[in-house]
Image: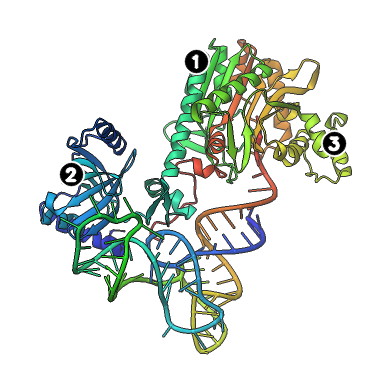
Amino acid sequence: MSSDYSNLEKIRLEKLTRLRKQGIEPYPTRAHRTHTSKTAIHLFEQTESEGNASGSVITLAGRIRSMRAMGKITFAHIEDGDGKIQLFLRANDLGEDALNLFNREFDLGDFIQASGELFRTKTGEITLRVNEYRLLAKAVTPLPAAKDEEVDGKIVRHTALSDPEMRYRQRYADLAINPDVREIFRKRAAIMRALREFLDNNAFLEVETPILQPIYGGAAARPFTTFHNQLKQNLFLRISFELYLKRLLVGNIERVYEIGRDFRNEGVDRTHNPEFTQLEFYMAYADYEKVMEFTEDMLVFTADQVLGKRTLIYQGQEINLEPPWRRVELAQGILEVTGVDIDAYSTAESLAAAMQDKDLPVEPQATRGRLIDNMLGDYLTPTLIQPTFVYNYPRDISPLAKSKPENPSIVERFEGYIAGMELCNAFTELNDPLDQEARFLEMGRDYDAEDEERHPMDEDYLRAMRYGMPPNGGFGMGIDRLTMLFTDCPNIREVIMFPHLREQDMEA
RNA sequence: GGGCGCGUAGCUCAAUGGUAGAGCAGUGGCCUUUUAAGCCAUUGGUUGAAGGUUCGAGCCCUUCCGCGCUCACCA
């Protein structure tokens, strides 16, 4: 690799060598700054409004983003965590040698610190008149950015890194030159903060449960497997938190949540990444209707905190999060979009026949629940643009949800949809250990033994439930998808710092 | 996994089967208030990889690698 430098990199390495020869360390151990670009500009505007012409000497630090050398003066912009600010370097202030050194040996992307006084240029830009500068870190590889232009206060980037593969593989470069990308992740952090604040304010306890699990469960998905060498034990990366969190309700923790990573060994597309961030909470003495209201409150709180308003634009569509959200019973919703009344057909065979009557595609060998799920995903989901709760699901695709007292084939479950995307999934949790055991056995029959998606029997979970689990409502939500909504990103990879990509040979 | 598309200079992109180019960046000059600075000159390529067809391949064919879209899969 080291023999593989590009021509541009070789030139920069030569500069680095020349700097060292002059006794300038290109990677000094310590740095110093007194202000960020933002606080410096704020300071200047303040002293200016007080009629104070001369400011005090300040020190800035950041990355060189543009340079305009004009003989005996040079203008440059540096960018720091807060933004950009212009530097003005003049032979009169620095001496010709120092100016020439800057012009000759410094490059776009280098980190520097610069000290001096602020002033306004002829064109009115607040600028640091540099009387001392220092290299903080030499950039050997040029950032893949070109030039920025400021038009009406907006930065227009003329050419920049846009190849998605390179943006994700080299997220560091993407972040370094695309401020919009940094903003997405600031929003993501704000979303997480708001959710935590809301749950903490509602007496929830945040916990962490095992990621490496001897038995996976809580969802229907294929797991990643791994192996503990010393214990000689197969382990699975969790596919949900559900079974562990509900054990905690048995332990008299009434309100509990976890925000963390789930891993599912399945297809990758614009709404699925192999590892993704999930919020799950469980609330004793609540049922799914209470959880619906709680969900509305939580998302409105999050919107208020993060966006400062309760509407957002997603891919050109205005979404209004103001409660109450529309509620559609699953059977009614499917009837409206397909003309098939699932309540009228109690077996997979009769339902499949009814679907064929309507010219709907029917997956062979599918269970009744699976057929219903297919109709939901294919026909109902895409129509659910405004926030909608779809509720009351067939029992056989919901092995951890409690049946409706008056109808054992329907469970108290809802999913929240926004912008045609499934966002969350919740139910009145099953707390009857005998029923739960029967459900595990049913699920085992629905999938053949080869299928890794079969729901394995979790004996310890049943043991916990036999100690007594309070009635409770549970909830799960994909944080990545929520972030997509709040940041208007069409692809989950945009909201994950390092999304999974196929391994690539670095030498290639 | 299937279908469609893409892969050319550091970045963004051109190039009927006939000498691989531009802008920006870089390099060398001129230039003391520029801001996509300007002007002059100039470097830079195993066209993703390997085969094949052809007098001749960035372009056509095959295989492979990677990415994107899409379908399948996915509670």
Q: Amino acid at mark 1?
A: Asn
Please tell me whether mark 1 or mark 3 is closer to you in this view: 1
Q: Are the numbered discs 1 and 2 placed on the same chain, yes or no?
A: yes
Helix, strand or loop status at disc 2? loop
Q: Amino acid at mark 2?
A: Pro
Q: Which chain letter goes with mark 3? A: A
Whole-number angstrom distance, CA of label 1 to CA of label 2:
45 Å
Q: Which chain letter goes with mark 2? A: A
Q: Residue at x 30, y 49 (%)?
A: A123
Q: Are the numbered discs 3 and 2 placed on the same chain, yes or no?
A: yes
Q: Amino acid at mark 3?
A: Val
Q: Position of residue A448 (x, y in %)?
A: 70, 38
Asked which colour scheme the image uses, the reply is rainbow
Q: Residue at x 73, y 42 (%)?
A: A378
Considering the image in quadrants, where does the C terminus of chain A appear?
Answer: bottom left
Would you say A366 lies left or right of A234 here?
Answer: right
* Residue bearing mark 2: A28
Location of residue A371 with respect to A101 vertically, above or below: above
Numbered mark located on residue A201 in the image: 1
Helix, strand or loop status at disc 1? helix
